[in-house]
């Protein structure tokens, strides 16, 4: 968006240091959103400006959340388009699923074969952004 602040989004491979490029998240209740991602990534939240929260994991700042007063959550898989989609690679689905749900995620699509060697499940974060836990 013109004039908006851009931030790097590099999501850690479920706390194991591998990074994937991405972008910032925009939403109406950014403190809840930042807290959700800090919980999943094992980080902390810094409220840096009136409209800006950063998630810190160690010395990294992998996720930033900016206030978007007119935010409308995407409707997965059809409807309002996604603003961002993250794939988080996890060592095992069970513990990662439990942690995501406890942090406030909503399961959108369960894996067809959760015991398969590789797969994914689709979730929504508290703002409705879809993301996947992949293994």
Image (spheres, rainbow, N blue to C red):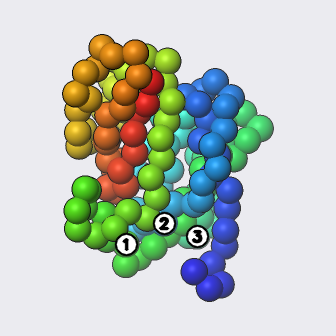
Which residue is at 55% across, 34% downward? Answer: 41
Q: CA distance from mark 2 to mark 3?
A: 14 Å
Question: Quick one: which residue is furthest to the bottom in this view?
Answer: 2
Give neighbour class at mark 1: few <14, some 14-19, many 20+ (Cα, 10 Å): few
- Looking at the picture, does residue 86 appear above or below residue 1? above
| Residue 104 percent coordinates (x, y) | 32, 40
| Residue 130 percent coordinates (x, y) | 35, 50
| In this rendering, the label closer to the viewer, 2 or 3 | 2
For marks 3 and 1 on the same chain, the one whose residue lies earlier in the sequence: 3
Q: Quadrant of residue 81?
A: bottom left
Circles 2 and 3: CB atoms closer than 8 Å:
no
| Residue 72 percent coordinates (x, y) | 31, 71
For marks 2 and 1 on the same chain, the one whose residue lies earlier in the sequence: 2
Q: CA distance from mark 3 to mark 1?
A: 17 Å
Q: Which residue is mark 3?
A: 50
In the picture, measured across the screen, residue 75 lies left or right of residue 126, that is: left
| Residue 78 percent coordinates (x, y) | 23, 62
- Looking at the picture, does residue 62 appear above or below residue 69? above
Circles 2 and 1: CB atoms closer than 8 Å:
yes
- Looking at the picture, does residue 134 appear above or below residue 26? above
Q: Quadrant of residue 74?
A: bottom left
Q: Which residue is mark 2?
A: 26
Q: Secondary structure at mark 3?
A: loop
Q: Which residue is mark 1?
A: 71
Any part of residue 66 in sight? yes
Q: Secondary structure at mark 2?
A: strand
Task: Pick the quarter of the image with the C terminus.
Answer: top left
Q: Secondary structure at mark 1?
A: loop
Give neighbour class at mark 3: few <14, some 14-19, many 20+ (Cα, 10 Å): few
In the picture, measured across the screen, residue 7 lies left or right of residue 74, that is: right
Task: Pick the quarter of the image with the N terminus.
Answer: bottom right
């Amino acid at each position: 968006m013109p004039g908006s602040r851009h931030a790097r989004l590099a999501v850690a491979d479920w706390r194991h240091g591998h990074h994937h490029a991405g972008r910032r998240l925009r939403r109406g209740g950014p403190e809840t959103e930042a807290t959700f991602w800090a919980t999943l990534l094992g980080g902390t939240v810094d409220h840096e400006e009136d409209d800006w929260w950063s998630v810190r994991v160690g010395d990294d700042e992998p996720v930033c959340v900016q206030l978007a007063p007119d935010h409308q959550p995407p409707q997965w898989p059809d409807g309002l388009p996604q603003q961002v989609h993250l794939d988080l690679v996890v060592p095992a689905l069970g513990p990662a699923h439990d942690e995501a749900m406890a942090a406030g995620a909503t399961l959108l699509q369960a894996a067809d074969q959760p015991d398969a060697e590789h797969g994914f499940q689709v979730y929504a974060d508290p703002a409705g952004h879809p993301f996947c836990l992949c293994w």
